Image (cartoon, helix red, strand yellow):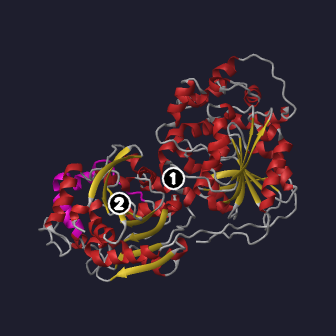
Amino acid sequence: MAAAAIRHRTVEANGIAIHVAEAGGEGSPAVLFLHGFPELWYSWRHQMEHLAARGFRCLAPDLRGYGDTAAPPAIESYTAFHIVGDLVALLDALGLAKVFVVGHDWGAIIAWYLCLFRPERVTALVNTSVAFMRPVFIRSGAAAEPGVAEKDLAPANARHVLRRVLCDRLSTDGKSKQESSDDSSSAPPPLPDWLTEADIDYFAAAFERTGFTGGINFYRNMDRNWELTAPWADAKVVVPTKFIVGDGDLTYHYAGIQDYIHKGGFKADVPLLEDVVVIPGAGHFIQQEKAQEVSDLIYDFLVKAQHATAPQRRSGETMAAAAVRHRTVEANGIAMHVAEAGPAGGDAPAVLFVHGFPELWYSWRHQMRHLAARGYRCVAPDLRGYGGTTAPPDPASYTIFHLVGDLVALLDALELPQVFVVGHDWGAIVSWNLCLMRPDRVRALVNLSVAFMPRRPAVKPLDYFRHAYGDDYYVCRFQEPGVENEFTSFDLKRFFKLALTVQTTGSSAMSLKKMRASNKEITLPPWLSEEDISYLASVYAKTGFAGGINYYRCLDLNWELMAPWTGAKVLVPTKFIVGDGDLSYNLPGVKSYIQGGLKKDVPMLEEVVVIKGAGHFIQQERAEEISDHIYNYIKKFNTGGPTPTLSKL
C-alpha cells in the first residue's frame, strides 16, 4: 500500500474538530491508533500501511491539542475524560460500535482509560511503552505553571526539540543521554536509520504552527485525572491485551516498573493480559524504530483476539435482623457517616441505599428495617456534603466521579465486592452512574423517581432547564454563588414540611421565593411525623445546604466529563418505580421516555412500576409498598453460588 492511500478528513466529535488519518477499507475491522507526546497520527504511518494491506481499517486521529485537531485554550479541557470522550464521540460519528485499540506513550495512558471506562467499545488492546498504572497512582504534583514549560518548548525551536526527543536514548547509567550530557548547546545527534529528515520535517512543521501547549496540558491534568478517577481506584482492565516495550525505553526503567510488569502486579491489574514483549535494543518510540517487528506483533495479536465476558456471580440469602447502627468510615479522602442495619458481615447479601436532595440516610429508615428483618445487610450513607459526611468547600469536588468514587471506596472499606443498590432522586442519578461506570460492583438496581438520563451531546443540562423553565427554576437558581445562604432565613421545620409535601411542577417546583412567601397552613400527611421533620431540621441547621446544592452546580461539568459514556447503556438488572404525582415524572417527555426509550438505554430493565397517587418522596410516603417492591425484586437474585471476592492489591 502506498503512502498516498492514507486519507485525511475532519470529524466533528465531542464539540471539537478532530483530524483523522485513515487507511484501509471502511467495511473492514477497525483499529484505532493513539499517539503520544510529542507526536502526531504520523507516528503510526508504518503500522497503518501494514495493517491496511492485511484487511484492517486504520484510524489515527491527532489527539485534542495536537496537529490539525482543535486545541481548546483552557487547561482543564484536557482531562482524561475529555480525551476519552473525544474518542468515543469519534467512534460514534464513524458508526463504529467496537474497535481494536493500539496506543503509545500518552496514547497508551488514554487507551488504558478507554478500556477502564468503556470496555465494551474495545475488542482488544495493544499498548506500547507505558504499562497500566492504577489511576490512584497516576498523580503528579509537579505540573508546570501555564507558560513555564512553553519557554523550553517554544514553537520556533520545534525542529531542535523533536530531533533531540525522538533520538533520545538511555545511557549506561540508566539516564537519558540528554540528561547525561553536560553541554545542552551541543550539536543535535545524527538521525538513526529509522528516522528521516522528511519525518522530522513533518513533525516540526506541525509543532511550529501549533506549539506544544496542547500536549503539555495532558500533564497538567494528571492530578485532576487522579481525583476524578476515584471510581476506578480498584478497577481492572478487562480487555484482551498485549504489551510491548523496548528494553531501552525510559518508561521501562521507572522505579519498580520491571518488577510490576514481570512479577505478577501487571497481570493482576490486567487479568486478560496475554503477552508481554520486551524488544532488546529498542527505545521509546518503538513503533517507528522497530516498525516491522511491532507491526507484526500487533497483527498477530489482533487476528486471534476474542472478546471475553465475565460471568455474573450471585450469593445466597440469610435471615437476621438488627437495630440501626451508626459509624464513620474513611473513604475516598473523606469521612462518611454510615447507618447500617441487619447482619454486620458474613455472607449476608448487602443493600446500598443512596439518598437524594434534601434528604439524608434517614429517608431509608423504613426500607432498612424491612430488609434487615429479612436477612439483608443494609448500608445507608449520608452522601458527600450531607449530614455527618465531609462537605468539601469547592463546588468542583461534587462531580459524579467524586460521588461514585465515594461509594466504590465505601464498598471497599466495608469489604463488599458487590451489592444491591437502591437510589432515590439525586441518589438515583448517582446509582445510574455507578452502574454505568462500575457494573461489576452492582448485583441489581432498584431506582426511584428519577429515570436514567442519557447524555445528550448537543444540549447542556443547564441550557435545557433554562429554556424549559427560565432562570428562576430552582436548578438554575442553585447555580448562583451564595444561594445556599438564602436558606438561613427559613424556619427549617416549615421548609421541610413544604419541601417534602410539594405537589407543584415546572418552574414552581422548589421555588425558594414562593416557599418563603407561602403562608398556607401545613397539615402533615400520615407518613410524615413531627419527629421526622425535627430530625431533618436539626441536621441541616448544623450543615446548611451548600453540599447538596453543589451537586446541581456540577451538572454542566458532569455533562462535559461524561463524554466517554455518550450512547452507553446501563447493563445491570433493574427495576424502576415512580409515583404518577412525582415532579420528575411530569417533566416534558419523561413519561413517553419511560414507556419506550428507557428500555433501550437500560436493556436489563425488567419492570417499571407507576404508583397512582404517590408523590416524589415515595419511599417514605408508600414505605411498606416500596419495601415490598424492593424485597420481591432483589430476593430472586439470591440463588446461591460463590460470593465475589474483593481483590487485595
Confirm whether the magenta stretch covers residue 155: yes
Magenta residues (range)? 140-166
User: Could you tell me which residue is drawn at 33 percent across and 43 percent down?
Assistant: 73
Q: Which one is in front, 574 or 160?
A: 574
Amino acid at dot 1: Leu
Mark 2 secondary-structure assignment: strand
Q: Main secondary structure of the magenta part?
A: helix
The answer to which of 456 and 147 lies nearer the viewer is: 456
Q: Position of residue 300 (x, y in %)?
A: 40, 78
Q: Quadrant of the C terminus?
A: bottom right
Circle 2 sits on which residue? 59
Q: Is residue 291 magenta?
A: no
Q: Nearer the viewer, residue 640 or 492?
A: 640
Residue 636 spot, x, y in % from top left: 80, 60
What's the mark number on residue 228?
1
- Identified at 40% across, 70% down, the residue is 127
Determine the CA span between mark 1 and mark 2. Answer: 28 Å
- In terms of image quadrants, where is residue 617? top right
Q: Is residue 384 visible?
A: no
**Residue 411 falls left or right of residue 253:** right
Q: Quadrant of residue 468?
A: top right
206 horizontally vs 251: left or right: left
Residue sitting at x 64%, y 24%: 511
Q: Image point 75% across, 56% down: which residue? A: 351
Q: Quadrant of residue 411?
A: bottom right
Q: Which mark is residue 315?
A: none
The amino acid type found where label 2 is placed reads Leu
Can you tell which of label 1 and label 2 is closer to the viewer?
Answer: 2
Q: Looking at the image, is mark 1 or mark 2 earlier in the sequence?
A: 2
Q: Is residue 475 visible in this depiction of the protein?
A: yes
What kind of element bears circle 1? Answer: helix
The single residue placed furthest to the bottom in the displayed view is 280
